[in-house]
Image (spheres, helix red, strand yellow):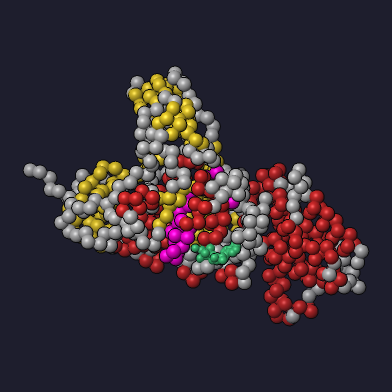
Amino acid sequence: MNQKEPVIVKVSGPLVVAENMHHCKMYEVVRVGEEGLVGEIIRLERGNAFIQVYEETAGIGPGEIVKPTGKTLSVELGPGLLETIYDGVQRPLKVLEEKSGHFLARGISADGLDHAKKWDFVPTVSKGDMVSEGDIIGTVQETSLIEHKIMVSVGIKNAKVESIEKGQHTVLDKIAVLVDENGTKHELTMHHYWPIRNPRKVLKKRVPEEPLRSGCRSIDMFFPITKGGAGCIPGPFGSGKTVTQQSLAKYCDAQVIVYIGCGERGNEMTEVLNEFPHLTDPNSGEPLMRRTVMIANTSNMPVAAREASVYTGITIAEYYRDMGYNVALLADSTSRWAEAMREISGRLEEMPGEEGYPAYLGSKTAEFYERAGAVNCLGSEGRQGSLTVVGAVSPPGGDLSEPVSQNTLRVTKTFWGLDAKLAYQRHFPAINWLKSYSLYLPNLDKYMKENVASDYWDVRGLGMSLLQQESKLEEIVKLVGPDALSVREKLILLVAKSIREDFLYQDSFNPEDAYTTNQKQYHMLKTILAIYNEGLKLVDREDFDFAKLEALPSIQKIAKVKELKMDESGKATAFEHVQSEIAKEIASL
Ligand SMILES: Nc1ncnc2c1ncn2[C@@H]1O[C@H](COP(=O)(O)OP(=O)(O)O)[C@@H](O)[C@H]1O
Ligand SMILES: [Mg+2]
């Protein structure tokens, strides 16, 4: 007898249940219904498959057929990823639009990579060379910014290059033949597929020791993240999560950016999609998209695609990391991802955990952020790469005790807490300096001392301590008024105010102010702190008139400290000049 055909028995929003699916496996991709909607098996139970469908399921019903594909949900990796905007299951939006117009038709297949485009492949190994998994065998200039490395597929070991073909090839063309130690022949192309839920293989994870420079003074000086670190940006609606993620995408010194957008507002993703392709990279002057891959979940896209999108994004990010690049993955907002998980879990009728989120929210969140890291890449060349992951979290009402924030805080080491009150006061970035933290300070100790200044951490420590003292003094002022303060305390308030207004405040939309180097940040802060260090020499004098100190011309000048420039040679003459003026004027009092 013929085996019975798989058919749909139930449809519940993005979840479809089909029977006669005994021969299928978990995470297998299936085509659902007459239209062949893309779906993935997320539970198997006595021949019934529970399928999350990445397309709108309205109109699909019981009795319609389901076709297994035998493949797990994978991304296609190879040249042509950069500059592309994808949906959550790696279909290029441009191709979808060409095939179906503005209203997304269903069941459309679209390859992740352009299979017709020819790339100029330049071999870096020759016939007779020995290679193993992860080794680079050639390159393709993917964009003006990024050279794509073609690597030997995972699983191939000690293979001899039998042939390798320079020249114009599509990603499907055979570019090399390898013969491994067992005599098995492997024909290599420039593309391959990788299952998105499995981390890509690396030789080993290293302790991250270099900063990811963001150019944002609050971040780099006070709450830094490493290349290979994991960070989160929680904050209520309108506090600046998206602006922060986008400035990271524009300015941070990763070589490749993967930006996953799950918009909070309906039109937010559209804004990003319209704006990004027109931005230029401030470092190279090239269009920013040449180092960027975007995954877009607009609000009209189905919830299951959102669930998959973070895995699609991080797998692409890992792939560039494996080439030896520093990659940054920015996900905005991961709360939308968690909500997608919650919806699907609800439809599966799983036992709900806190606030209806599935009990595995914590482990899924951890697995995601654990894919960040500084690594020794697979391959014998000793390449190093890194993947930094920063996720925005949008807790309802800004209350961090909710499950998504809590689970994210548990696994990320940098916390940039955005504050509604600061945003309301238009203090940007609205990163609360009292609540935020970075656990990467010990990792960066050596790097900052060697590359910026030997007293870097003293300067940072004093700045932070004055901000903390300020908040305590403000409490006192609230209770007993400002007259009760000593001169020393007044000095602390004066300098802390300057740190807030002249150092922390930074306008992301002003090209002059949006990016500050580590060196300049250090000298700015040190110049502001000169007021404190010099002022301290006077505070114990009985006849000291604080108003006179405040009125000194050099102290007035501090408001313009961000306009000072470092010398071409890297010296800080302009800053040192203001510091010595401060010292002279205070001494003359
Ligand atoms: N660093 C910044 N510099 C200047 N303006 C900012 C900055 N961060 C946020 N803003 C302002 O706050 C608004 C809301 O920020 P947004 O990132 O969209 O909030 P969220 O994503 O948290 O809802 C922005 O449109 C902008 O006007
Ligand atoms: Mg936002």
Q: Is residue 555 visible?
A: yes
Closer-to-camera residue (42/561): 561
Closer-to-camera residue (121/316): 121
Residue lying farthest to the bottom in this orientation = 480
Residue range (magenta): 251-273
Residue lying farthest to the left in this orientation = 1
Left or right of residue 296, residue 526 in this image = right
Residue lying farthest to the top in this orientation = 128
Q: Give how far across and how far down residue 229 sits, in percent.
A: 55, 49
Left or right of residue 313, residue 46 in this image = left
Give the quarter of the image for residue 360.
bottom left
Q: Give how far across and how far down residue 192 sits, in percent.
A: 37, 37
Left or right of residue 546, residue 122 in this image = left
Q: Give how far across and how far down residue 342 sits, in percent.
A: 36, 62
Residue 391: say if magenta: no
Q: Quadrant of ligand 1?
A: bottom right
Q: Residue at x 81, y 73 (%)?
A: 486
Q: Residue at x 22, y 61 (%)?
A: 59
Q: Give how far across and how far down residue 320 sits, in percent.
A: 48, 41
Q: If the image is split into quadrants, where does the C terminus sit?
A: bottom right
In this picture, is 320 found above or below 308? Answer: above
Q: Residue at x 69, y 71 (%)?
A: 472
Q: How many marks?
A: 0
Residue 272: say if magenta: yes
Q: Is residue 52 visible?
A: no
Q: If the image is split into quadrants, where does the N terminus sit?
A: top left
Q: Residue at x 76, y 68 (%)?
A: 494
